[in-house]
Image (cartoon, coloured by chain):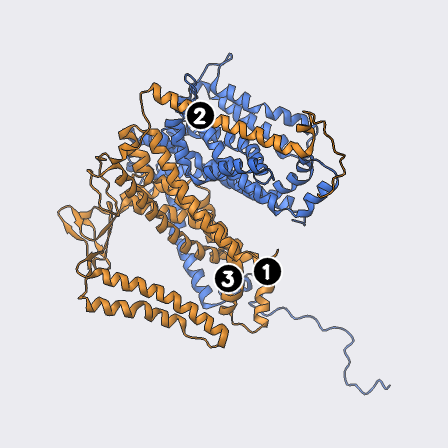
Chain colours: A orange, B blue
Amino acid sequence: MSTSTVPADNSFQLSQLWRDARYRSYTIQIIALVVALSVVMMLIGNAVENLEALGKDFNFGFLFEPAGYDIGQRLVEYTSASGHWKAALVGLLNTLLVAFLACLAATVIGVFVGVLRLSNNWVISRLMAVYIEGVRNVPLLLQILAWYAVFIHVFPKPKQAEPLLGGALVATNRGFYIPGFTYEGAYLAVVAVFLASIAGIFIFRSWAKKRQEETGQILPVGLYSLGLLIVPTAIVYFIAGMPIGLEFPTLKGFNYVGGTKAGTPLIALWFALSIYSAAFVAEIVRAGIMAISKGQTEAAYALGLRPQRTMSLVVLPQSLRIIIPPMISNYLNITKNSSLAIAVGYMDLTGTLGGITLNQTGREMECMLLLMATYLVISLTISAVMNYYNESVKLKGR
Amino acid sequence: MSETNFAFVATSDKPQLPAPKGTTGAIGWVRENLFSSPMNTFLTLLSLFVVYSTVPGLVNWAFVNSVWNANSLDECRALTENGACWGVVRERYHQFLFGFYPSELYWRPILAFALLFVALVPALWDGMPKRGLALMGSMTFPFVAFWLIWGGFGLEPVSSTQLGGLLLTMIIGVSGISFSLPIGIVLALSRSSNLPIVKSLAVIFIEFIRGVPLITLLFVAHVLLNYFLPKGVNFDIVLRVVIMVTLFASAYMAEVIRGGLAALPKGQYEAADALGLGYWQSMRLIILPQALKISIPGIVNTFIGLFKDTTLVLIIGLMDPLGLVAPTLADQRWNGIVVELYAFIAFMFFIFCFAMSRYSMYLERKLHTGHR
C-alpha cells in the first residue's frame, strides 16, 4: 500500500478508466449510479406526466375524508364516518393481530412437530413427515380458501350453535365468540400494577442470576416469579373493587352479542397461516437440533449434568443460535403472507388501504406507496431486531 | 506341563445362541421403535388411531364411493352418500389445464410443454455430448414457447385473457424460475462486492422487494405499472405479472446465493486471486460453481415458493387453477362443490412441488463431495 512500484505516470489516458484497476472500480460504480438514477428519473418522470394527463394530483388529503365503509373485525373504535387513515390503522392492527396470533401458534405447533419428526418412533415420525410434506407443497392461498370453506360449512348458524366450555366459547359459521373484558372504575391501576410486576420479574431474575454467579446459591426463581406475577395484581384488583370483569357472549335474536368476536375470516386465516407455517418451523427446529453434534450431549452427561439441564444449558443455547435467524425470517414471511387475507375478506392493511380505500378514492399511487411503505417498515423493524439478536449470539472470533 | 490335569478343554467355539426372542426381527423392531417407553407407546397408539380414523374414510371418499359419471352435483349426490364427485373434474379438466385456450389449438401449449423438457435435458444432464451447443439451443426455448402459446407469425394469435389454468401457472412459474436465477446471481454478486455504490444499490433493491408482500407487487403490476411507462407503451397483463414475479423471486434468490458465497471458505477467494485470475474468471471458474452447489436446496426452495405463489394472480383476476374455482361454482350444476375442486388443485400443485423437492434432495446427495 505505502510504496507503489508503479512509476509515477503523469500522462493519464482515457483507456486507464477501464484498463487500470485503480480507476476501474470508480468507472463501474459511476456507470451503475448513472444508470440507476436515470431509470428512477425516467419512472418518476413518466408517472408525473401520466398523472397530469389524467388530471390527477398527488396528495394524501384523501386520508382525512370519511371512509364510508364498515369493518367488522376491529381492535379500535371505528365507524364508517371515520377517516380513511383510521380505516388504514384498523387494517394495520388487524394485520399485526393475525400475524402475531399465527406466529405464536405456528411456533408452538412447529416445535412440537419438529421434535416428534425426530423421534425414534417410526409411526409418529412418518406421520409428521406426511404432515410437513403435505402442507409445504400446497399453495397457502388454496389452504386459506379451503379452511374458510370448512369453517363456513362445518360450523352451525348462531341460532343452532351450542356454547362450549360453559358458555366461554361459541363456534358458529359467522365466527368464534369468546368472553371479553369489561372495564370500569380504577381499572388503570390494576393494569399499571400488572405491568409493573412484569418489569419486576425481569429485574428479579437478573438479580437472582447475578447472585447465583457470585455466591453459587440458587433461588427458586420460577416460583417467586409466578408469585410476583399474581399476588400484587390480585391484591390491587380486589382493593379496587374488581374493576375488570368478564362478559360472556349471549344469543340475541339471530346473532350473539357481547364478548369478543373473532370472525370466520380471521379464524380461517389464522388456522391456515399457523398450520402452513408450522411445517416450516418444524423443519427449522429439526435442522437446528440435528446440527448439534452428539458429542455435546455426551460431554454434558460426562460432566454429570442431568438430561433436563443438558438440554437447557448445552443443547438449546447452541441450537437456538442456528434456529433463531431462519425462525425470524419465517415470522417475517407470516406477516407478509397475512396479506392474503384479502382472499377471504379479512380487513387487514391490504384489504382496507390497498383494497376498498384504493377503489373508492381512485388514488392508486398514494395508496400503494403507503401500503408498501408500511409493510417495508414492519419488515425492516423485524429484520433489525433479527440482526441485533444475531450479533449478540454469534460465536465470537470465528 | 501335564495334559491330564484338566477335566475339560474346549477345542472349538461353542455354537452361538440365537439372540433372545423379542429383540430381533419384526417383534424386536416394533418393541424398540414403537413401544420402548410408556410415552412412546402412547404416541404410537395415538398416531395409529389418527391414521385409522382418517385414512379409510379418505380412501372411501376419494376412490371407493366416488362418482365420475355425473353431470351435476345433484345427480352425483343421488348416486353416492359420502363420496367425491369427480364428475366436475372429468367435465372441466381441460379448463383447469388450459383455461379458455381454444380447444382446437391445445396442441400448441402441449408442444411447448414437451419442448420444455427437451430444453431442460442439456441443463440437467451434465454428461451430454456437445452440451454447450445444446445449451445454446435451450436458450431459444422461451422465444419458441412464446410464439407457440401466443401465436402470430403464421400461427393463429391467442390473447392473454384466454390463458388460464395450469398453463398460466406454468408460464408464470417457468419464466419466473428461468429469469430469476441469472438476475439473482448478478444481485448476489453486487451485494457481496466491495464497490460501495453497486453494493448499496443491490441492498436497496433486495431489501425493498423482500420487505413487501408479493401481493402488493402484483397490485402494482395490475393498477400502477401503466403510470410508470411512457405514454402509449402498454404491456400485456400476463407479461406484467411475469416481470413482477421474476423481480420478487430474484431478490430471494440473491439472498440464497449470497448465503452460498458467504459460506465458501475465504481461502477459495484468496486461492483464485493467487492464481492471478481476474474477478469474472475467478467467479466463473472457482467461486460460483461451489457457491451455487451449496445453495442448491435454497434455490429449489425458492423455486417451489415461486411456483406456489403463482396462485396469487387470482387476486388480480387472472384465471389460474384456483381462479377457475369461482366460475365453476357459478355454474348452477356445480354450485357448492368446493371440496373436490380444492382437493384436485391441491393434488396438482403437490405433484409439481413434491417432485421438485425430491429432485433437490437427489442433487444435494449427488453433489455432496465431502468438503463443504
Front-most of B355 and A363? A363
Counting the numbered discs, the total is: 3
Q: Which mark is residue A316?
A: 3
Provide residue A68's location: percent of width, then percent of height.
21, 35
Residue type at mark 1: give it.
Ser
Mark 3 or mark 1, whichever is nearer to me: 3
Q: Can you say whether B310 is above or below A92 in the image? A: above
Dot 3: chain letter: A
Provide residue A260's location: percent of width, then percent of height.
23, 52
Looking at the rendered structure, the secondary structure element under dot 1 is loop
* Residue beneath disc 1: A293
Instruction: Left or right? Give the position of A293 relative to B233.
Output: right
Label 2 to label 3, Cα distance in Å?
50 Å
Dot 2: chain letter: A
* Residue beneath disc 2: A43
Is any part of residue B193 visible from this angle? yes
Q: Earlier in the sequence, mark 3 or mark 1?
A: 1
Is any part of residue B63 visible from this angle? no
Q: Earlier in the sequence, mark 2 or mark 3?
A: 2
Provide residue B361's location: percent of width, then percent of height.
57, 45
Front-most of B21 and A125? A125
Residue type at mark 2: give it.
Leu
Looking at the rendered structure, the secondary structure element under dot 3 is helix
Tell me whether the residue at label 3 lies in contact with that at label 1, contact meaning CB atoms closer than 8 angstroms.
no
Q: Residue furthest right?
A: B1
Q: Can you say whether B363 is above or below A51 in the image? A: below
Q: Residue furthest top?
A: B154
Looking at the rendered structure, the secondary structure element under dot 2 is helix
Label 2 to label 1, Cα distance in Å?
53 Å
How many neighbours does mark 2 have within 10 angstroms: few (below 14), some (14-19), or many (20 or more)? some
